[in-house]
Image: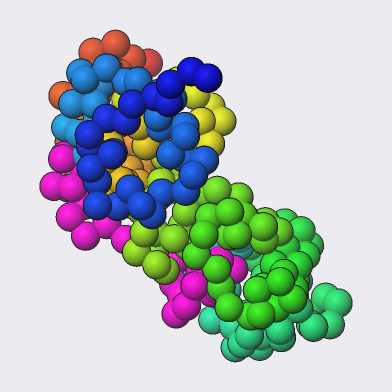
Amino acid sequence: MPPKPKLDPMHAESPQWQHVDDRLKSEIAARKPKPAERQRAAAIADLLEEEFPKAFCALHFSNSFELLAATILSAQCTDERVNMTTPELFRRFPTPRHLMESEPGAIEEVIRSTGFFNAKAKSLREASRTLVEDFGGKMPVAIEDLTRFRGSGRKTANVVRMHAYGLPGLSVDTHFTRITQRLGLTKATDPEKIEFEIAALLPPERWTLFADGVILHGRKTCQARAPKCEACRLAPLCPRIGVEVKSPAKRKSS
């Protein structure tokens, strides 16, 4: 039997390592980033923490189940729209059982503006049923359990763990994917592979603030169609600068 890969001290000695799920631990152990890659990731994390020292989850919630539901609704939808929708949703269906036993069309009516409302309503009903029937109505903490809910993959499970339970995690959405690729931190396109690769670059205690900072940076500065590279705090560490970014004069005439 081949020997187990040796962990880097920043993971093995992290006070948060015990809260990392077994699959992610295994993925981290199998990766061996170069010291320079880790140093660069840490420098990017430092700049993001300077720019967003109080980065937070933009979704509004009062308990872990509400956050799960809000995150399910956020697929292909803005957080602002979700936050406009969830107060009425939770007023009409205050508990998972209410959602589970809702009349056909009732949830759909409330969440219509979030898009894909039929699929999202089905996810909310089935997630509620799983919570009531399999977990006795008590939200689980383990990522293996959180991914059992319909509509909840590792991204959604991480959001709940990060912001409802204060545990380390990396929520990989479209902003996170775009920014980490542009910064040269990953070439992966699969969200799980991106999570695993970034997790290997930083200690667990930095994951949540890094993930939230990346997402806020993507919304504020490194936007999809028109990144504001001239005003970017991360420009000194970005491989795009000087390669893909045109000067203001050229950009205006193009």
> Which residue is pictured at 39% across the width and 24% down the height?
5
Q: Is residue 26 left or right of residue 222?
A: right
Say if residue 93 shows up in the picture: yes
> Which residue is pictured at 53% across the width and 36% down the height?
192
Quadrant for residue 251, please give it: top left
Q: Nearer the viewer, residue 117 or 69?
A: 69
Say if residue 186 shows up in the picture: no
Expressed as whole percent of the image width and height from the top left, the position of residue 180 reads 37, 31
Q: Farthest residue to the top: give it.
A: 243
> Which residue is pictured at 44% across the width and 80% down the height?
62
Q: Farthest residue to the front: give it.
A: 1
Whether the magenta-drawn stretch holds residue 65 is answered as yes
Check the image and report above or below for 126 versus 29: below
Q: Is residue 106 left or right of residue 8?
A: right
Quadrant for residue 221, please give it: top left
> Which residue is pictured at 21% across the width and 60% down the height?
54
Q: Quadrant of the C terminus?
A: top left
Whether the magenta-drawn stretch holds residue 150 is answered as no
| Extent of the magenta region | 46-70
Q: Nearer the viewer, residue 251 or 218?
A: 218
Q: Nearer the viewer, residue 18 or 194?
A: 18
Expressed as whole percent of the image width and height from the top left, the position of residue 83 reads 49, 70
Q: Is residue 75 left or right of residue 172?
A: right
Expressed as whole percent of the image width and height from the top left, the position of residue 247 reads 23, 17
